[in-house]
Image (tube, rainbow, N blue to C red):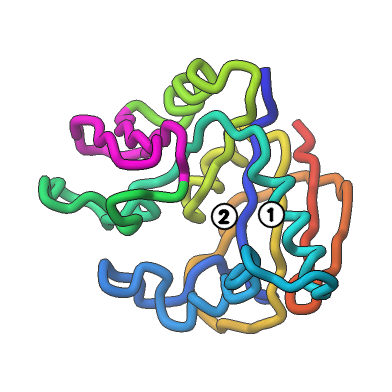
Amino acid sequence: MGNVSCQISMSLDGYVAGPEQSRQDPLGRDGLRLHEWFFGLSDLPEGDPRGVDVAVVEEMTRDVGAYVMGRRMFGDGGGRWDPQWQGWWGDEPPWGVPVYVLTRQVREPLVMKGGTEFHFVTDGPRAALARAREVAGERNVSVAGGAETVRQFLAAGLLDTLQLHVVPIVLGAGEPLFAGLGDVRLVQESVVAGPTVTHVTYRVRR
């Protein structure tokens, strides 16, 4: 059975998205700044100092057989589904494997280009993880976000590894990653410093 991990970008003051998230602005005000470190990594020139970030991305996406995400990360805030809305990710989402979306509203699966299949799970994170593990087999399962979904997995003791990409910005408000979690115990495994972001990997203690 593979590892259950999560990797997520976070501001220095603990936010993983900005305030005022909407369908038009899914990351909230200034939230895109959390992900600027990732832009352009696919075509860096040889010797670029951001090569350390490339290595981190390659490691964190290697051998992932399925993903779990929350409904908001898929692309909607709640309530009844708009059947015409197929999420933030366009016709060919980047996942390339089955994705299990936590939701309270039933929806038929969506098969997209490039190998991504969205499946909508209404009976909680344990059920979503069980389905993801079944399809992933010996490969890893990645919890893609957002914050509420990561908190649910941490609170339930379902994560093995948490990787934070700590971006040196202060958002001041938004979606806090650790709000209300209480005593989550993490053991630091590695720290990789890139030019614009620090990648910190923790093992989650049961």
Image: 89 above or below 140 = below
Amino acid under disc 1: Val
The region drawn magenta spans: 95-122
Amino acid under disc 2: Gly
| Horizontal side, residue 138 vs residue 79: left or right | right
Label 2 Cα neighbours within 10 Å, binned few <14 / some 14-19 / many ≥20: few
Image: 107 above or below 13 = above
Quarter of the image with the C terminus is top right
Q: Quadrant of residue 53?
A: bottom right
Label 1 Cα neighbours within 10 Å, binned few <14 / some 14-19 / many ≥20: some
| Horizontal side, residue 120 vs residue 47: left or right | left
In the image, residue 119 lies in the stretch drawn in magenta:
yes
Which type of secondary structure does the marked residue at label 1 adopt?
Answer: helix
User: Residue 121 versus residue 61: which sits nearer the camera?
Assistant: 61
Residue under label 2 = 180
Residue under label 1 = 57
| Horizontal side, residue 127 vs residue 42: left or right | left
User: Residue 46 versus residue 65: which sits nearer the camera?
Assistant: 46
